[in-house]
Image: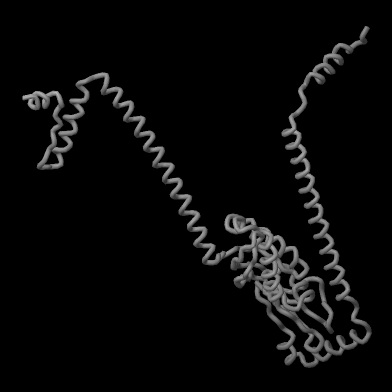
Amino acid sequence: MPGPGGGNLQSTALKAWQTPPLSDSLQQTYLTSSVSRTQLMEMDQQRIESSKRRTMSNNDLISERTGSLGACGWILVILSGIFTIILFPITIWFSLKIVQEYERTVIFRLGRLTDKKARGPGIFFILPCTDSFVKVDLRTVSFDIPPQEILTKDSVTVSVDGVVYFRVSDPIASVANVVNADFSTRLLAQTTLRNVLGTKNLAELLSDREGIAHSMQSNLDEATDNWGIKVERVEIKDVKLPHQMQRAMAAEAEAAREARAKVIAAEGEMNASRALKEASLVIAESPSALQLRYLQTLNTIAAEKNSTIVFPLPMELMSNFIRK
């Protein structure tokens, strides 16, 4: 005797046993979607961890540079301050500095960073003898990537150029971590363009420019993050093919268009023949319809002001004259 609820359990088990299993295609689709989601999650985690490591390393680097000046350093700073106060009417012109709204200033005191944050915009003071500063422009800068001769994945030589838009996101890193951030970014953009396009086919290069530009932007942004550079946009300007390849592609496109034109003409003739067949069947059912069609044709010819009109005569009418 089944206990309470035993019948429900048996029916549930029977339904589960009778339920057909999923097809192989559905199972493969589910597995692929789950794997892709897992890969996306792993990529996001890796990006977050890499950004955290870069931030920690940058902070450690700045903290090492902003250490104590030491006893001799403080003595020099105090002497410089006293000298500035004594000669204040003269030294004020050397101590007072102005920074524009789109600029920031990185100040070094005896070769060390004075603060973890850049100064500006506005007015700030420096000590003439011990302090030095570097102005950094925060506006977006654009430059053209020179044409690069690249061998694609399918062994086709092409010439590609582009344009890159970037700006300084961290003034301290752009001054302290790299000698010339602008020049370094330009060189890195050229090598990145070669590396990215070297893994693409010619068809992908011509059709997927947006994807290539996005891939270049992500690679450049990740590589220049330690330099305090933010790559905002990358665009592929022109793709130049060899003349022989251009002629071959033009011949291929022309042949494809001619083939489509022939197919369309053949389909039109087939439809016209079907229409003529149906018209002949309709005319065969009514003998007077042929005479009406003949009169309509004569009306069309007469409307064009022709001096010659050909009248078709039945052969039965001519046979009487032939016998005589």
Q: Does 170 sit above or below residue 131?
A: above
Residue 121 visible in this rendered orientation of the protein = no
Left or right of 202 in this view: 288: left
Q: Position of residue 121 (x, y in %)?
A: 69, 73
Looking at the picture, tell me which residue is in the foreground, 240 or 34: 240
Q: Position of residue 310 (x, y in %)?
A: 13, 36
Q: How is the image coloured?
A: one colour
Left or right of 302 in this view: 224: right
Looking at the picture, tell me which residue is in the foreground, 54 or 101: 54
Q: Residue at x 75, y 63 (%)?
A: 222
Q: Does 322 sit above or below residue 138?
A: above
Give the image quarter of residue 64.
Answer: bottom right
Q: Position of residue 124 (x, y in %)?
A: 73, 78
Q: Position of residue 148 (x, y in %)?
A: 62, 70
Give the image quarter of residue 68.
Answer: bottom right
Classify the position of the C terminus by image quarter: top left
Q: Does 112 sit above or below residue 32?
A: below
Left or right of 260 in this view: 139: right
Q: Residue at x 27, y 19 (%)?
A: 285
Q: Residue at x 59, y 63 (%)?
A: 236
Q: Does 53 sit above or below residue 302?
A: below
Give the image quarter of residue 128.
Answer: bottom right
Residue 173 visible in this rendered orientation of the protein = yes
Looking at the picture, tell me which residue is in the foreground, 321 or 221: 321
Classify the position of the N terminus by image quarter: top right
Left or right of 322 in this view: 83: right
